[in-house]
Image (spheres, rainbow, N blue to C red):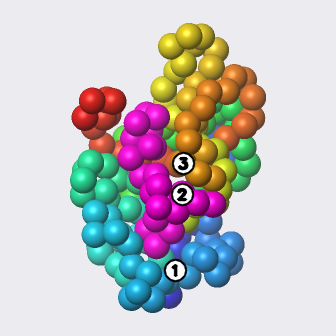
Amino acid sequence: MQLSISIERTGPDGLSIHIPDLAELTASDAPQPASQLPSSRYRLLDAGGQPTRDTPVLVHDTTTNLIWTAADSITRDRVNHTRATEAARSLRYMGADDWRLPTMHELLSIVDYGRHEPAIDTAAFRCHARPYWSSSLFAGDSGFAWFVGFHYGGASVCSRDVDSAFVRAVRGPVRAASQ
């Protein structure tokens, strides 16, 4: 098993950005047997940015050309939308400083509708069946933002002020709904 690196960074507002270390990994995070390899659209990357079959640090989606954090969340707890946005933007990871909160459509692009609890390729991503914030604001009221629940892969809105979701960061060009 490859050792996952751990980063604890405290931003100006005291926000702790967290990537789990090996001691925090669960059995579901362990390397998968060949029969449980990720979809061919995902390229798993280690701490050096090199392809790996062990526990990945990053996931390159070759369909969208986005780079995702493989960790379950970059925050330890549920946070509100503002803190989620700040956590993603302030992430300095793998030599990159252009991390961001994904759009709703980008988050929905990694949902695997053939799975549930969680509805994601667990050979590529460490993910629990819980909600993750998107950067997309609700058109009907900008006090609300969209999140994607990885229980079954659905999207919904929630008040941006509520500590109700986790954070998965992404890098790459923003993908609109039609892309």
Q: Is residue 175 magenta?
A: no
Label 2 neighbourhood size at 10 Å, few (<14), some (14-19), many (20+)?
many
Q: Main secondary structure of the magenta part?
A: loop
Mark 3 closeness class: few <14, some 14–19, many ≥20 residues within 10 Å? many
Badge number at residue 130: none
Q: Are marks 2 and 1 in contact (CB under 8 Å)?
A: no
Q: Nearer the viewer, mark 2 or mark 1?
A: 2
State which quadrant residue 62 falls in.
Answer: bottom left
Percent of width and height locating residue 17: 61, 49
Residue 134: x, y in percent? 52, 35
Q: Is residue 14 visible?
A: no
Mark 3: secondary structure: loop
Mark drawn on residue 3: 1
Residue appearing at x 50%, y 87% in the figure: 1
The range drawn in magenta is 102-124
Q: Which residue, given by chain and number where applicable, does mark 2 sit on?
A: 119
